[in-house]
Amino acid sequence: MQSNQIEQGPDVRERDLFYFPPELNIQFWDTNLKEPNAFTVGRICARFYAPCFEAGECCSPYRQQNALRMLMTFSFYFMLVQLAFYITLVVKSTDVTWLVVPNDDVLMGYGALTKYSIKDHNQYYRFLSFLIMNSSLFQILVNLFSTFLFCLPLEKSWGFLRFTAIALVGGIIGGFANAIHCPEPCTGASCITFSVSGAFIFLLAVKFSSIGDLAKAEYAFCLMMVPFNFIATSFLPKVDWLAHLMSFFGGLAMAGVIFSNQIISGCASKTVLVISIVILALLVAIPVTLIYVKP
């Protein structure tokens, strides 16, 4: 019995090195690793950079399962709507720069957000419409890339309802921040990504001690992408950096409400829940007050 335990010990430790909680699974695509050529250099690179094309042979059950799963996600349709909206905005514009930034009047006509549209005209629908809008070619490319590789697997891990609640609440909080001070038309599709990033970092902090050492390296790469994404998209034309920042904290607070039960200590779980609710209330109350008080 003792020798068996000794023999099994390294295997257990090896499995622990790669362990990650299911809520932090950032792999969406099921791949068939039993194929003879599954571990060639070309296949490994393809699996990293284009995993949707590495889910088994063409028309295999793996491909069909992945395609059906993707068609049932919020993230997939969010990508489609973003792309369709952006193409429409560009086609409708008459004076497009090399950054492929749509005209202001076109942006406003299709739901972009300014402080005047809320304070003076009470057009509250813009808190939602601006979340599917992009204002430059670079912004939509970054957003589509982030949604495909980051949001899609997290929606699979969290479930449709929890993911959608985090994405929309955080995005709308970003819209509140935008409406405080931004006088020009702004788009906010990136707010969804930052809201999800905030929730992801909350879970990473809560679950960090249980993650295997080798798995932590992959999560470190994801963490480095968050500030890069912020810098890359927050200072583009028609984009409000404060909206991105507030969306991040909105997602962080929403994760505290939704995932507080993941904390082992009952007392700590309740404390995090209360603090998260208070932060959410402040993230809504302060901007809304400033919208109507600030001249």
Image (cartoon, rainbow, N blue to C red):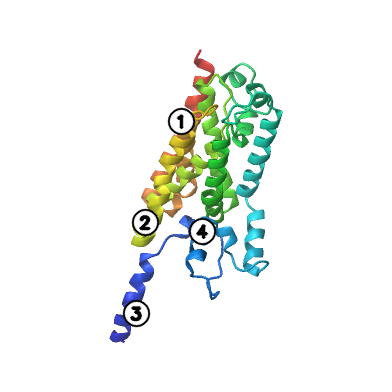
The first of marks 2 and 1 along the sequence is 2
For image coordinates 54% across by 24% down, the residue present is 179
For image coordinates 47% across by 66% down, the residue present is 41
The first of marks 4 and 2 along the sequence is 4
Numbered circles on residues, count: 4
According to the picture, the residue beneath numbered tag 3 turns out to be: 8
Distance Cα–Cα, label 3 vs label 2: 25 Å
Distance Cα–Cα, label 2 vs label 1: 34 Å
Of badges 2 and 1, nearer the viewer stands: 2
Mark 1 is on which residue type? Leu
Distance Cα–Cα, label 4 vs label 3: 28 Å
According to the picture, the residue beneath numbered tag 2 turns out to be: 217
The x and y percentages for residue 157 are 53, 56
Q: Residues within 10 Å of mark 1 (few under 14, many from 20)?
A: few
Q: Residues within 10 Å of mark 3 (few under 14, many from 20)?
A: few
Mark number, residue 27: 4
- Residue 184 shown left or right of residue 91 in the figure: left
- Residue 284 shown left or right of residue 20 in the figure: right
- 280 relative to 70, above or below: above
